[in-house]
Image (tube, rainbow, N blue to C red):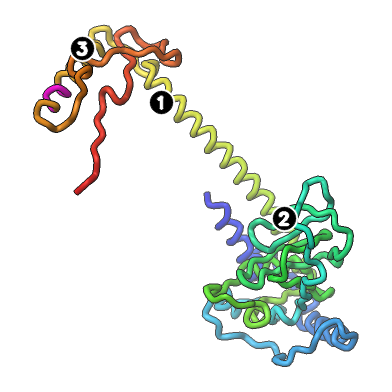
Amino acid sequence: MDTKLLKQKILDLAIRGKLVPQDPNDEPASILLEKIKKEKEKLIKEGKIKKDKKESTIFLGDDKLHYEKLLDEKPNIWEIIKLDDVLYYEQPTPYIVNDTKYDDKYLTPVLTAGKSFILGYTDEKFGIFKNFPCIIFDDFTTDTKYVDFSFKVKSSAMKILHCNTSVNIKFIFYSIQLLSCNVDTHKRFWISLYSQKNIYLPPKSYQDKVVNLIETLFQQVDAIEEEKQSLLKLIDKAKNKVLDLAMTGKLVKQDPNDEPASRLLEKIFEEKKKLAKEGKIKLSKDELLSPPTSVDNDYYQDIPTNWRIVELGKICEIARGGS
């Protein structure tokens, strides 16, 4: 089972309104949208965010990406919005760590939006971000992380995203996980592209319910993944045990009438001498005088009496490449 794909499927169903039954009595998202617009206007008036010069009415984009193409399947009381309608960014410059000599005994984590996430811990007391929860967005790779604790950052190559208080920020975060874009070019993506991407806006009650369900299901998927990894380790151990039993003569019942390995070594010796005579392999004078003999090996002492222990190089030859 590919648990990563399973999580993507859970998100896909949740964000399209197919994981939790719709309640026709929920306050429609159109009313929620008005609340969002009023809060945004208030923040602009207070100088906390800037007015978007490119702002326009909510629309269904013509982006050909997979997730965007599903946006016409929304339930009737849902709306379609841009990320920029519910998220506003803060530059991370005031929170950049000064000293990168991290130590696990320190308290404040230093974050990146990439796979590493927590790079280490610092003892710096100033410039600590405390206005959580938030989403950190890598401006060059578009990786995102949900953060609900204080932190500092490694560099300015990210945006700290705040969410409108009328919306469940985790729902927005999970919606972002289904978005994608081409990041081959080296540029900052939040303002130029990502903030204009379209997502669903369901009623707030649906957002809360589906976030709880997503996290419950994700915990179950993580448990499945943990069990899968444990099972794979057991399988590897079983394979090694089978090989060990087979190579020490304990997997198949021994036949006392079998030709002993000492005779097999003599045949190998005769074949190698023949190949040496034909010029196909090279043997030293000592190797030409006597067949390979058993060697001492404590690990393989407990083998059948008609087996022998030999060095691998005594019965194999190196085939070199060349032409």
Residue 135 in the image: state x and y as whole percent: 74, 67
Query: Which residue is labeled 2 in the image?
Result: 118
What amino acid is labelled 3 in the image?
A: Arg
Q: Which segment is the magenta one?
A: 271-275
Judging by the rendered image, the residue that carries numbered circle 3 is 263
* Real-space Cα separation, disc 2 to disc 1, in angstroms: 41 Å
Q: Residues within 10 Å of mark 2 (few under 14, many from 20)?
A: some
Q: Main secondary structure of the magenta part?
A: helix
Across and down, in percent, residue 114 comes to 65, 62
Callout 1 touching callout 3 (CB < 8 Å): no
Magenta includes 181? no
Q: Residue at x 70, y 81 (%)?
A: 79
Q: Determine which quarter of the picture holds residue 201.
A: bottom right
Q: What residue would you read off at disc 1?
A: 243
Asked if the residues shown at circle 3 and circle 2 are in contact, with their CB atoms under 8 angstroms apart, the answer is: no
Looking at the image, tell me whether mark 2 or mark 1 is earlier in sequence order: 2
How many other residues sit within 10 Å of disc 3, few (<14), some (14-19) or many (≥20)?
Answer: few
Q: Tell whether 224 sits left or right of 103.
A: left
Q: Is residue 197 left or right of residue 152?
A: left
**Front residue of 24 and 119:** 119
Please, what is the three-letter code of the amino acid marked with disc 2? Ile
Seen from the viewer's position, the closer of residues 4 and 280 is 280
Q: Position of residue 115 (x, y in %)?
A: 63, 58
Label whose residue precedes the other's in the sequence (3 or 2): 2
Cα gap from disc 3 to disc 2, whole angstroms? 63 Å
Say if 169 sits above or below 40 in the image.
Answer: above
